[in-house]
Image (tube, rainbow, N blue to C red):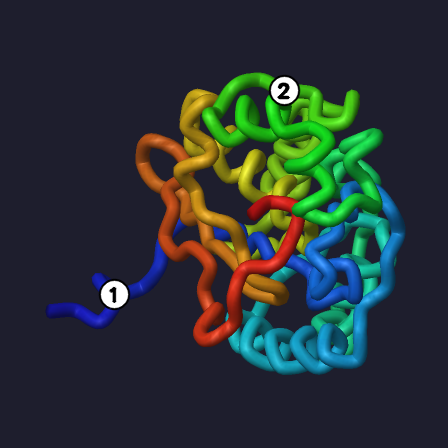
Amino acid sequence: MNEDAYKRTGRRLVLWRHGQTSWNLERRFQGTTDIALTETGITQARRAARLLASLEPDAIIASDLKRAAATAGELADVTGLDVTYDEGLRETYAGAWQGLTHQEIIERYNEQYTAWKRGESVRRGGGELETEVADRAAPVVLHHAEKLPENGTLVVVSHGGTIRTTIGRLLGLESGHWESLGGLSNCCWSVLGEGARGWRLLEHNAGTLPEPVLGDDT
């Protein structure tokens, strides 16, 4: 078979979650709270950046929150690319939930939490709906994807919840089914490829083992 038959066709999106933070370790809901990476998080980002650089990305975009910006910076250092920051890629705003631990959320907002896990449309802590997060994040990704060269690769550095809702929207899934996409571990990524009928999920939570998923989206 001709070698060209194995070559990738179409654009590629790499949606990369930020590295570890202290609030991840404490199972504390971050949302839009601007928490920095831990030393472990920086190490994770550097390791992942070396792997992602081998994909020869054409562009990097990122949430402007510290944990995502610092993660993106590691890839920028390796590739020499500039990072475009956009607040549309921030994590879900979760109002009163932000700063609470997982256990505190269950104790204080159990009915709301349970409804969310059932896939219902819930303003967690009085914050954003998941569909509203997708409404602001997915267009940012598509806008930058349109600028890619043929078969180009865009790296999107964001947050677990935002990445999941964006993937769900780009795949055309109904919002009630977005929960079927498992969470991303720190500094792991998912890959969407351009197919004849739209975007396809090629990889999910790549680079994860043996790290557990710790974050707002679990």
| Location of residue 36 by image quarter | bottom right
Q: Is residue 150 visible?
A: no
Residue 210, image x, y percentages: 46, 75
Q: Residue at x 48, y 71 (%)?
A: 207
Q: Is residue 112 left or right of residue 22?
A: left
Residue 156 location in percent, x, y?
Answer: 65, 52
Q: How many marks?
A: 2
| Residue drawn where x is 63% and y is 20% of the image | 122
Instruction: Name the secondary structure under disc 2.
Output: loop
Q: Position of residue 153 (x, y in %)?
A: 55, 57
Q: Which corner quadrant of the image does residue 74 belong to?
A: bottom right
Q: Is residue 215 left or right of residue 197?
A: right
User: Would you name the residue on which mark 2 appears?
Assistant: 122
At horizontal 81% and vertical 40% (from top left) the residue drawn is: 98
Vertical placement of 130 versus 195: above or below?
A: above
Q: Is there any visible trace of residue 199 in the rendered image?
A: yes
